[in-house]
Amino acid sequence: MSAYKDILVAETRRRIIEESIPRIKKCLGELEEKEIWYKPNDNSNSVGNLVLHLCGNVTQWIGSGLGKKPDNRTRDLEFMEKGPLPVSRLLDELQKIEE
């Protein structure tokens, strides 16, 4: 069973670290700060909120769930953030996933 877990972790890591995060970084680089934090209404999430949510989700499920690291996630804050946080802050959060 451990071999399957190792394969799952390796493939998940490859998809997130090698494929998804570079794409997200590229997209963030194409947007202005106001576009990153734009919400058409109160029931929607901004791109910035979704990036924070992704970082929290990956950290919780991969880092804590599979990697046995501490789970310090406060999920509600990911959606409550109104921004604008600098793009550098979002990139820092993405960088933490890569480490």
Image: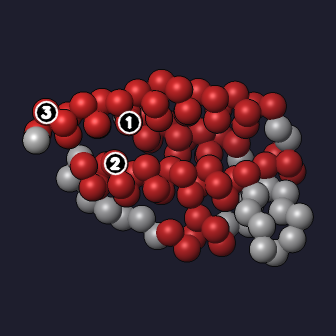
Q: Nearer the viewer, mark 3 or mark 2?
A: 3
> Who comes first in sequence, dot 3 or dot 2?
3
Crowdedness of circle 1 by 10 Å Cα count: few (<14), some, many (20+)? Answer: some
The residue under the point 62% across, 50% down is 51
The C terminus lies in quadrant: top left
Q: Which residue is mark 3?
A: 3
Instruction: From the image, tell me which residue sits under label 1.
Output: 12
Residue 79: percent from the left, percent from the top?
64, 68
Q: Quadrant of the N terminus?
A: top left
Residue type beneath disc 3 = Ala
Identify which residue, 99 or 61, lies in the foreground: 61
Could you tell whether 71 is left or right of 36 in the image?
Answer: left
- Whole-number angstrom distance, CA of label 2 to CA of label 1: 9 Å
The amino acid marked with disc number 2 is Ile
At x 47%, y 56%, the residue is 56
The earlier-in-sequence mark between 2 and 1 is: 1
Colour setup of the view: secondary structure
44 relative to 62, above or below: below
Element type at marker 2?
helix
Circles 2 and 1: CB distance less than 8 Å?
A: yes
The image position of residue 20, as x and y in percent, is 55, 33
Tell me the element at label 3: helix
Image quadrant in which you'd find residue 84: bottom right
Question: Which residue, given by chain and number where applicable, does mark 2 sit on?
Answer: 62
Mark 1 lies on a secondary structure that is: helix
The 10 Å Cα crowd at callout 2, few under 14, some 14 to 19, many 20 or more, is some
Instruction: Give the Cα separation between the discs numbered 3 and 1.
Output: 14 Å
Which is more N-terminal, label 1 or label 3?
A: 3
Q: Name the kind of residue labelled 1 in the image.
A: Thr
In the rendering, at what x and y percent does residue 10 appear? Answer: 30, 30
Residue at figure coordinates x 87%, y 71% from the top left = 41
Disc 3 and disc 1 in contact, CB within 8 angstroms? no
